[in-house]
Image (cartoon, helix red, strand yellow):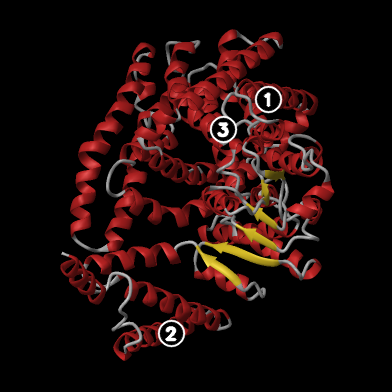
Amino acid sequence: MSGSLLFNAIVFLAGAIICVSIAKRLGLSSVIGYLLAGVLIGPYVLGFIGEEGEDILHFAEFGVVVMLFLIGLEIEPKNFWNMRKSILGMGGIQVALTVGLTYVLFAFLGYEWQVALAIGMAVALSSTAIALQTIKEKGLMNTTFGSSSFSILLFQDIIVIFMIGALPLLSNSPENTGDEISHSASTLIESLPIGLQTLAIILSVVLIVLAGRFVVVPMLRKVAKTGVRELLIAAAFLIVFGISYLMEFVGLSPALGAFLGGVVLSTSEFKHELESTLEPFKNLLLGLFFMAVGASINFVVIANSPLTIGGILLAIIVIKALVLFVTGRIFKLKLDQNVLLTFSLAQVGEFAFVLLSFAFQLNILEQEQMDMMLVVTAVSMSLTPILAVVNERFILPKIGTKESIKRPMDHIAKSQKVILVGFGHFGSTVGRFLRSHGVEATILDFDSNRVDFLRKMGFEVYYGDATREDLLESAGIAEAKLLICATNKVSVAKAISKIVKEKYPHVEMLVRTKNRYDAYELLNLDVTNIYRETLDTSLALASDALNKLGFRKYTLNRQVQNFIKYDEASLRRLASEPKREEDYVFIARKEIEQQEKLLENDFKRGIVAYDNHWDSEHIRKQLEKSEEGNN
């Protein structure tokens, strides 16, 4: 029964649902839940899945493949060039120092130089899957820490291509053993002489770039002309599957091929369509990968050499953490952002599985050495979310940019009646407009680099998580009149609104939302002042379009105000309706029909049809007559 595909699917899905739900309930990352589920259903606990989890690990890596393809789509060449200093600088320093220190460690332990160098290259790579998943979950992608992590991970994803190309040069044997001959039938590179393997790897990368440009894009154009959406979805998967298979056939990592394919297609007109098609599958497949990593932890190997593996694991984490911290200091990251970077990337990543297996096939590593390093890799990945929780709850609150500012607290309470949460593109516009009218706001932001910059600009600013009641208190919420929530995360807005409604009901909240669905959630929490970020901009564009078609500006401004009034009323009615799709669609269609009818009646009834204001024809004629009379 355990060999049944349906049974395995049930086990994986049930494990994910149960463990991830528990992890989120405890306030932990979903990655911890997936890893725990993998350990529980693995061969050494409940034994639901195959030998050491290896039977599903290769399939599970498809989640990493899809993720790297989507990352590649986001890396347009011009953006890559703009980020070159942080990518090459931070990434280059981190990889070079980690490889060097790890080489010294394993050389000191008595390993041959080829083995020490191969392990050093594997250890230098952090987990893109775990790091980016955690960063996105916590909404830290736009912070200094998020952008620095992305730069380092991107450099690692690229340099691994050259590492794979260099491994054949470290091979201890020019001849394949009998065991490897049977394996080499499925990989092209291993059948080549050692001297030609590096050249074959470089040519494979070049072929992917050329194929993406001259084969894939023309194919997508032909598929798009059919107008059948499911064909485009099938084409998206064909691209990812095809590149992955070819790279695996050649003997390289399929994930690397997918990343390169994504970069090649990032400038095509199908970029956003491919992103929207594959995004829903990415997180589920990544969850499967994390579970496979948890299941692949070989507790037998750990039991045989617990002190050796524990010591090597600790030494590797310390080395990576030290290198990351030094790298952050070189690039002048603030202490809290640097500590976040250090804890987030101190693990060994998924590409280590690829490098270690390839090194074993080339006779660089022995079986015992590979088994030990695979366990160290899997355990380090499993520990990362736990270390992140320790960092977040016990270390970060005590270090970094202080949450209190140097000015006296009574000065804050008396002068600042507005608290502004979030100072990104949206919040900065709000803050600057308030300040231009003599209204200062106390600003709360979670990016300490941005906090220091704002303080130099003269803004009253606190660093920290605005969902914490003690931070709101230190910002003077007890005496504030308004709290403006300018962040785009509805979870933050909901958490703040609950605190304000319960403890500070006198404070009026003005909340930014991305769309009407987020607005529904806030309305149901009795938040009334909601500002959808796309509403005013879209109406301004529509108004300008009608003006260019001959409609009067005053008429259009009146109609825009009417549209907002009717839409806001509709929004509040729909917020309390059942959210089943069929019911919602029916009621929403009725609301839209009623809204359009009201606007049409306003126009026909003469409320705006005969407005003689601003740029009306009536005023123009009067001005023309006046000018003629003066002449």
Query: How far across and how far down the image is residue 271, in percent?
Result: 33, 48
Query: How far across and how far down the image is residue 269, in percent?
Result: 27, 48
Q: From mark 1 to mark 2, how far is it between C-alphas? A: 56 Å
Q: From mark 2 to mark 3, how far is it between C-alphas? A: 46 Å
Query: How far across and how far down the image is residue 381, in percent?
Result: 65, 37
In this rendering, is residue 329 above or below 475?
above
Circle 2 crowding by C-alpha within 10 Å: few under 14, some 14–19, many from 20: some
Which is more N-terminal, label 3 or label 1?
A: 3
Is the residue under label 3 in contact with that under label 2 (CB below 8 Å)? no
Q: From mark 1 to mark 3, how far is it between C-alphas? A: 12 Å
Which marked residue is nearer to the observer: mark 2 or mark 3? 2
Q: Residue at x 35, y 86 (%)?
A: 607
Q: Residue at x 58, y 24 (%)?
A: 124
Label 2 sits on residue: 591
Circle 3 crowding by C-alpha within 10 Å: few under 14, some 14–19, many from 20: many
Quadrant of the frame with the N terminus: bottom right
Total numbered badges shown on the rendered structure = 3
Which is more N-terminal, label 3 or label 2?
A: 3
Q: Which is nearer the eye, 329 or 348?
A: 329
Left/right of residue 4 with respect to residue 65 in the rendered view: right
Left/right of residue 558 with respect to residue 63 in the rendered view: left
Q: Amino acid at mark 2?
A: Glu
Q: Which is nearer the eye, 402 or 162?
A: 402
Q: Residue at x 71, y 35 (%)?
A: 336
Label 3 sits on residue: 148
Left/right of residue 446 with respect to residue 56 in the rendered view: right
Q: Which is nearer the eye, 521 or 484?
A: 484
Which is more N-terminal, label 2 or label 1?
A: 1
At mark 1, the secondary structure is helix
Q: Which is nearer the eye, 457 or 46?
A: 457
Q: Amino acid at mark 1?
A: Phe
Label 1 sits on residue: 325
